[in-house]
Amino acid sequence: MTHVSRHLHDAFPNDADTISRLKADDAHFQDMAARFEAIDAEVAAAEGGDDPASDERLEAMKKRRLALLDEIAAYLAGAGDVK
């Protein structure tokens, strides 16, 4: 399976301005974004064959990525009204 990168702007297209603002100004969001990019790169490497992974390991990485997306979505929901 070919990995499709899921940049935060792609995952949350309606929150592009908020994401940009938080990436510039919010240390906690910067950390979440960096962790998301890291796990997304791990999934891409595993799916692309650069870092072969067992099905179980790949599934665990995808679950961590999804949980982080849920955390980011909740954070964006609370930050969207703050300017």
Image (cartoon, grey):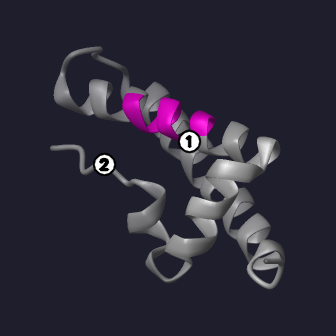
Residue 82, quarter of the rendered image? bottom right
Q: Residue furthest top?
A: 51
Question: Residue at point 63% right, 71% down?
Answer: 18
Precedes in sequence: disc 2 or disc 1: 2
Counting labels gives 2
**Residues under numbered marks 2 and 1 in contact, where contact means CB atoms less than 8 Å apart:** no
Judge whether residue 1 can be spotted in this image: no
Q: Measured from the top left, where is residue 38 in percent x and y?
A: 50, 30
In this figure, which residue is indicated by the disc labeled 1?
Answer: 36
What secondary structure prevails in the magenta region? Answer: helix
Q: In this rendering, would 23 be left or right of 44?
A: right
- Residue 25 as seen in the image, left or right of residue 69: right
In the image, is residue 7 above or below residue 42? Answer: below
Q: Residue 15 or 60: which is nearer the viewer?
A: 15
Q: Residue at x 49, y 43 (%)?
A: 62
Which residue appears at 44% of the width and 77% of the height?
13
Which element type, helix, strand or loop, lies under badge 1? helix
- Image quarter (top left, top right, bottom left or bottom right) of the C terminus: bottom right
Up-down relation of residue 59 to residue 54 (above or below): below
In the image, residue 17 lies in the stretch drawn in magenta: no
Instruction: Tell which of 82 and 78 is nearer to you.
Output: 82
Residue 30 image offset from top left, x and y in percent:
68, 42
Decide whether residue 40 is among the magenta residues: yes
Q: Is residue 49 above or below residue 60?
A: above
| Kind of residue sitting beneath label 2 | Ser
In the image, which residues are magenta? 34-41
Q: Residue at x 75, y 78 (%)?
A: 77
Q: Which mark is residue 5?
A: 2
In space, the residues marked 2 and 1 are separated at their CA atoms by 11 Å
Per the rendering, the mark at residue 67 is none
Three-letter amino acid code at disc 1? Phe
User: Where in the figure is residue 81, as x and y percent of width and height?
Assistant: 80, 85
